[in-house]
Amino acid sequence: MTHAELREKLRSASLFREFTDTDFAELLALVDPVKVPAGTIIVEQDDPGDAMFIVVEGQCRVVHHKGGRDIELAMLQSGDFFGEIALVDEGPRSADVIAQTDTEMLKITQAVIAALAGVYPSAAFKLLVAIGRIMVERLRTANQRYVDTLLFRLRDSD
């Protein structure tokens, strides 16, 4: 896939909302494209993280394993990303991510972020701010679910 095709597929993704064509070109010059066939485990729960991935084309299922049960957390598609915590923490992955269809992604490592910041600081800043904004949205959603669960339990105990 060419840079122009990648840019067109990802242009509407919230992660790249603030990106100019130049910002895209700068990022795409540094990232690694990855193609995986359907059924491939892209990242495995409890493995150390070393990169984040942006889904360009295809679908990926996010599954957490607990007590012998599989809990589907999300279905990802073009423009979605996962593994972003690995950019700041090489701790264990919190879930499996499995390609549901043949999937094309961009792999972004800590080294890519460092290079981007050194050579194209504006693009790095925009990317990290967008990741942070989306992570905050995800955290707010998770907190609301947690509070709703607590309130539901309180109502049931009355």
Image (spheres, rainbow, N blue to C red):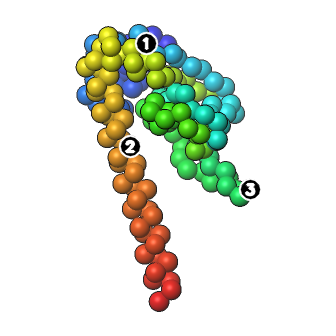
Q: Residues within 10 Å of mark 1 (few under 14, many from 20)?
A: some
Farthest residue toward the right?
68
Q: Quadrant of residue 144?
A: bottom left
107 vs 22: above or below: below
SS category of the residue bearing label 1? loop
Q: Could you tell me which residue is drawn at 39 percent across and 55 percent down? A: 141
Of mark 2 and mark 3, the one earlier in the sequence is: 3
Query: In this rendering, would 51 be left or right of 3?
Result: right
Q: Could you tell me which residue is drawn at 74 percent across and 56 percent down? A: 68
49 vs 69: above or below: above
Of mark 1 and mark 3, the one earlier in the sequence is: 1
x and y, in percent, of residue 124 in the image: 32, 22
Of mark 1 and mark 2, the one earlier in the sequence is: 1
- Residue assigned mark 2: 135
Query: In this rendering, would 138 be left or right of 68?
Result: left
Gap in Å between the C-alphas at discs 1 and 2? 23 Å
x and y, in percent, of residue 136 in the image: 35, 46
Q: Residues within 10 Å of mark 3 (few under 14, many from 20)?
A: few
Query: In this rendering, would 44 be left or right of 151?
Result: right
Total marks shown come to 3
- Residue assigned mark 3: 68
Q: Residues within 10 Å of mark 2 (few under 14, many from 20)?
A: some
Q: Given the image, on which type of amino acid does mark 3 rest?
A: Gly
x and y, in percent, of residue 157 in the image: 50, 86
Q: Which mark is residue 30?
A: 1
SS category of the residue bearing label 3? loop
Gap in Å between the C-alphas at discs 1 and 3? 40 Å
21 vs 70: above or below: above
Q: Is residue 98 visible?
A: no
